[in-house]
Amino acid sequence: MTATTTRAGTPAQESDLIDVPALLRAYYDLIPDVTNPDQKVAFGTSGHRGSALDAAFNETHIAAITQAIVEYRTSQGITGPLFMGRDTHALSRPAETTALEVLVANNVRVLVDEFDDFVPTPALSHAIIKYNAEGHDDQADGIVITPSHNPPRDGGFKYNPPHGGPADSDATSWIANRANEIISAGSKDVMRGEPSAVETYDFRRNYVEDLVNIIDVEAIKKAGVRIGADPLGGASVHYWQLIAETYGLDLTVVNPNVDPAWGFMTLDWDEKIRMDPSSPSAMASVLAHKDDFDILTGNDADADRHGIVTPDGGLMNPNHYLAVAVQYLYTHRPDWNPEAAIGKTLVSSTMIDRVAESLGRTLWEVPVGFKWFVPGLIDGSVAFGGEESAGASFLRKDGTVWTTDKDGILLALLASEILAVTGKTPSQLYVELTEQFGSPVYERKDAVASKEQKARLGKLNGSAITATELAGDPIIARLSEAPGNGAAVGGVKVVTDKAWFAARPSGTEDVYKIYGESFVGAEHLARVQAEAKVIVDEALGN
């Protein structure tokens, strides 16, 4: 990350807040020019995102994307209900209204929340999977309207096919291309109607009452774990209260406020309001309560990410918690397939590799993007999938699929189960892992790159790396394809016995990201990072 600025971690001021009415007006008033790359429909790893103020997320976009989704699901023979939910971003409500008008006009059976409540991403994934496991003659899919942890000015729109997880690149490319065609032709192919006869579904209760089949809630209750949960103004706000009531847990919703401007947040590292539960700056107000609870957690706006705070360790690094979660789950889920692999993304900590080896489990290393874990979670061949960006999910106690999208509520509850069962906090257990496997130092930095350089990096082959050493140690791997599934990583990863770095182009800024980790120490990591930039620049011909 870039250097922390002076206001990072301090409360947002009036000047930091968006003008919500102006943002909503822009959604309807601005017409995008899809010949402009910044205004066309473009699906990243988690859907189409942008701001109405930049003509990047407007009524025109959402109507065209929804029409394209209708045509896509028809082409795939998907005729069941479409579950739809939204988060607490200001643009999510108008986008939901637009999408409903298009879906109803196209005679799609749509299910929205029974209480007009916000719907976390994992609850929507759970609903799709539940319906499709019930033996219906048709299959359900879904749309979740969220830009995840992005700033309040942004909107997001994501399609989840019948497997319940993020759509793969074949589907998103088809949908994006068709949506841009529709807009270019004046949106005449978009059908619109009054969203009057829409069905409802109780996402909240269906999700919460099923948690007993994946989390040992009885152990948490018996141990009397004092839990604090901060939704960070996001979609999980009413879920936490129902979890407390349903299972009789000592659980306090630390901040139940929902504000589309997020005026109660502390500023992130770059002085922006960003609901990232893995960021110490964004979580500063939550951390003020760390001594009030045994386990304190945070979620982002759609609750697909988690932040874990303990009295002894503060906010855990996501990599540290993922390693602890893997160690705990694979030794406390006796009904899981003994051959089930451990899933991690290419830029997650090597600590997970060492834990996997000690457990005698196969490590399944994939490119960045939770979509890669979907097939394994569905068939049980991967029992846990996690990303360094604080997103993960795992299987039910019986080894069957729970969600195929990231579940921040689940991972937050797991921290309390770990404490209840082991008597130790996740941060204490991580210290034990470092005593066994070493203590890695991990960091991500950004380096300036033009669009052309980013494009070259995204297609770079590992064989283009000519260096033989990294920070004084022999290079043992130069990867441009993930070891787990052979898929292109969209960059490169260079590995030694003591360290690694990975370089990937940013999808939103003119930089590339350098991830690095060293089991030697901070000075060694700094050397790895410096040499990484030289190695990548040489490979790019800079």
Image (cartoon, rainbow, N blue to C red):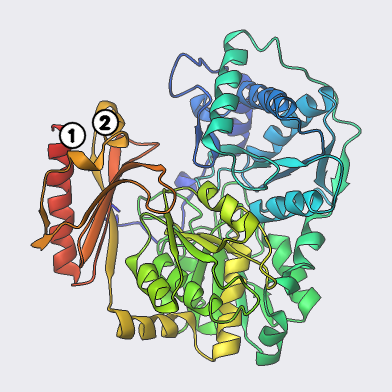
Residue 311 image position (x, y, % from top left) = 47, 83
Q: Which residue is mark 2?
A: 456
Say if mark 1 contacts mark 2, CB within 8 Å: yes
Query: Would you call the spot at circle 1 few (<14 residues within 10 Å), some (14-19), or many (20 or more)?
Result: some
Q: Decide: is 33 above or below 99.
A: above
Residue 81 image position (x, y, % from top left) = 82, 39
Rendered residue at 31%/85% (across/down): 435
Nearer to me, 91 or 213: 213
Q: Which residue is mark 1?
A: 540
Disc 2 residue type?
Arg
Nearer to me, 393 or 333: 333
Element type where label 1 sits in the image: helix
In which quarter of the view is residue 52 placed? top right
Asked if residue 149 can be seen in this view, the reply is: no
Nearer to me, 524 or 7: 524
Asked if residue 130 can be seen in this view, the reply is: yes
Residue 413 image position (x, y, % from top left) = 62, 73
Q: Decide: is 533 above or below 507.
A: below
Q: Quadrant of the C terminus?
A: top left
Disc 1 residue type?
Leu
Rendered residue at 38%/49% (across/down): 482
